[in-house]
Amino acid sequence: MADLRPVPADLFEDLLDTVREPAVPSAARTRLRTSVALSSTFAADDLSDRLGSGVTDGEVNRFLAEDCAPILGSRTGQWRLRTAVRHETLAGLTAEQLRELE
C-alpha cells in the first residue's frame, strides 16, 4: 500500500503554481510583486509604506491571496512571495530595475 502523507501548504501552492495558466498582472500587482521580490519575507502592513498611494486595499488583498503565502506560526503577519511568482517577477526585470531594488 502507498505511504500517503500530507503535503505542506506552501509546497502544495508552489506545485499548483507550476500548472496554473499564467495571467498578465496589472500595473498595481506588478508594483506589489517587484517591491517584495528580493525579500525573503515581508509584513503586509509594510506594503503601503513601500508603495505609497496608488494601490488599493483590494489589490493588496488579492496580491496576498494569489501571489503570496503566509509564514505559518508568525505572530507578526509575515508573508512570502510564492516561488514561481518570484521567479517570474525577477525574470521580467531589467538590470537597471534590479539595481534599484537593492
Image (spheres, grey):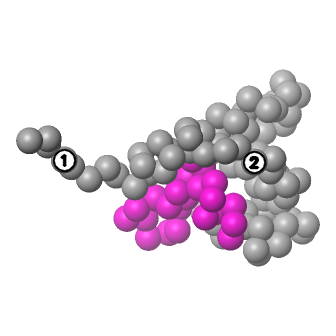
Q: Residue furthest top?
A: 95
Which residue appears at 76% of the width and 75% of the height? 57
Report helix, strand or loop for mark 2: loop
Q: Nearer the viewer, residue 84 or 1?
A: 1
Query: What range of the chain is rendered magenta?
Result: 61-82
Residue ID at (79%, 32%): 92
Q: Which residue of the protein is positioned furthest toward the front in this rendering?
A: 1
Residue type indicated by callout 1: Leu
Residue at (55% x, 38% y) in the render: 18
Quarter holding residue 48: bottom right
Residue 79 at what x, y percent from top left?
Answer: 55, 58
Disc nearer the start of the sequence (1/2): 1
Quarter of the image with the C terminus is: top right
Front residue (pair 11, 40):
11
Q: Which residue is mark 2?
A: 23
The disc labelled 2 sits on which kind of residue? Ala
The residue under label 1 is 4
